[in-house]
Amino acid sequence: MDLSGEYWVPVPIAGFESRFVLSNKGRVKRLSGWISRGRIMFLQEKILSQKLIINSEKTYSLSCTFKQ
């Protein structure tokens, strides 16, 4: 479910722009579609979980793993 005022843009990574989108609220969404990994499956649209990585006292990273 989208948050109030949230809009989405394609992920600016070659090969992923048609499968994932980024929101202005910092979230990542997998778009629904068919995939083939040994068998054909349909994946529903889903907000992906993210992991906060603290690099130091002043910097941090937000991580989300993409699989094609």
Image (cartoon, helix red, strand yellow):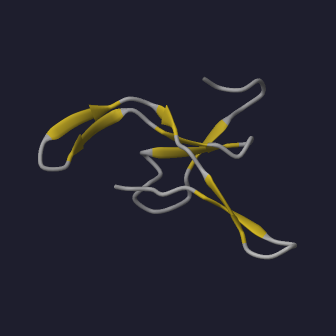
Where is residue 15? Give x, y as percent.
39, 59
Q: Quadrant of the N terminus?
A: top right
Give the residue drawn at x 86%, y 73%.
57
Q: Is residue 59 left or right of residue 37?
A: right
Instruction: Relative to 28, say whether 60 is above or below.
Output: below
Instruction: Relative to 61, say whether 55 is above or below.
Output: below
* Image quadrant where residue 4 sits: top right
Q: Residue furthest right?
A: 58
Give the residue drawn at x 81%, y 71%.
59
Q: Is residue 25 left or right of residue 39?
A: right
Q: Is residue 37 left or right of residue 18?
A: left
Q: Quadrant of the C terminus?
A: bottom left
**Tag count:** 0
Q: Residue furthest left?
A: 38
Where is residue 39? Give x, y as percent.
12, 42
Q: Is residue 21 left or right of residue 27?
A: left
Where is residue 29? Give x, y as percent.
53, 40
Q: Nearer the viewer, residue 53 or 5?
A: 53
Q: Nearer the viewer, residue 67 or 52?
A: 52
Instruction: Relative to 44, say whether 50 is above or below.
Output: below
Give the residue drawn at x 49%, y 46%.
20
Where is residue 53? Give x, y as percent.
67, 65
